[in-house]
Amino acid sequence: MTAAPVIDLDDRPAARRAGASVAQRLLALARERYTFGRSSSGEVYAVPKAGPPIARLIRGGPTSLRAELAAIFYRQSGQVASSGALADTMCTIEGLGQSDDPVELHLRTAADGDDV
């Protein structure tokens, strides 16, 4: 019996070839654009590699990473990622983030006139 082949998800061209699943392609896209980590409260977050280094939690809300990945994937491939592929991708990202040492995330505030 032969062992199943190992797919190196850091090898972006291999993850994007025709045989790669949509979840594998989404994960390669996410790893290309984000660094993942775990906050001191245990929440997994993503920080964009380009642009302002603002952490966004993996779970939650209208600005979720899941929705952004789905939109990027559609713009690049013309395909709609299934909810199953997105769920598999987000679960894998959470697992990757959980393996990191916790980092304290800081809330940034700024003045806007008399408001904070």
Image: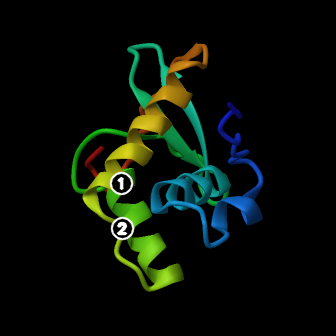
| Quarter of the C terminus within the rendering | top left
Sequence-wise, which precedes: disc 2 or disc 1? 2
Question: Which residue is more in the foreground, 105 or 71?
Answer: 71
Say the numbered circle drawn on residue 81: 2
101 sits left or right of 11 in the view = left
Q: Position of residue 32 (x, y in %)?
A: 66, 56
Q: Residue at x 60, y 66 (%)?
A: 19
- In the current view of this chain or complex, which residue is farthest to the left? 61
Q: Residue at x 66, y 59 (%)?
A: 15
SS at mark 1? Answer: helix
The answer to which quarter of the image holds residue 109 is top left
How much space separates mark 2 and mark 1, taking CA atoms? Answer: 7 Å
Q: Position of residue 31 (x, y in %)?
A: 62, 50
Question: Which residue is more in the foreground, 11 or 63?
Answer: 11
Question: Which residue is more in the foreground, 38 or 111?
Answer: 38
SS at mark 2? Answer: loop
Label 1 is placed on what type of residue? Leu
**Residue at the spot of label 1:** 86
The image shows residue 39, relative to residue 30, as above or below, that is above
- In the current view of this chain or complex, which residue is farthest to the front? 1
Label 2 is placed on what type of residue? Ala
Q: Is residue 103 something that shows in the picture?
A: yes
Q: Residue at x 42, y 78 (%)?
A: 74
Say the numbered circle drawn on residue 102: none
The answer to which quarter of the image holds residue 101 is top right
Whether label 2 touches label 1, CB < 8 Å = yes
Q: Position of residue 14 (x, y in %)?
A: 73, 61
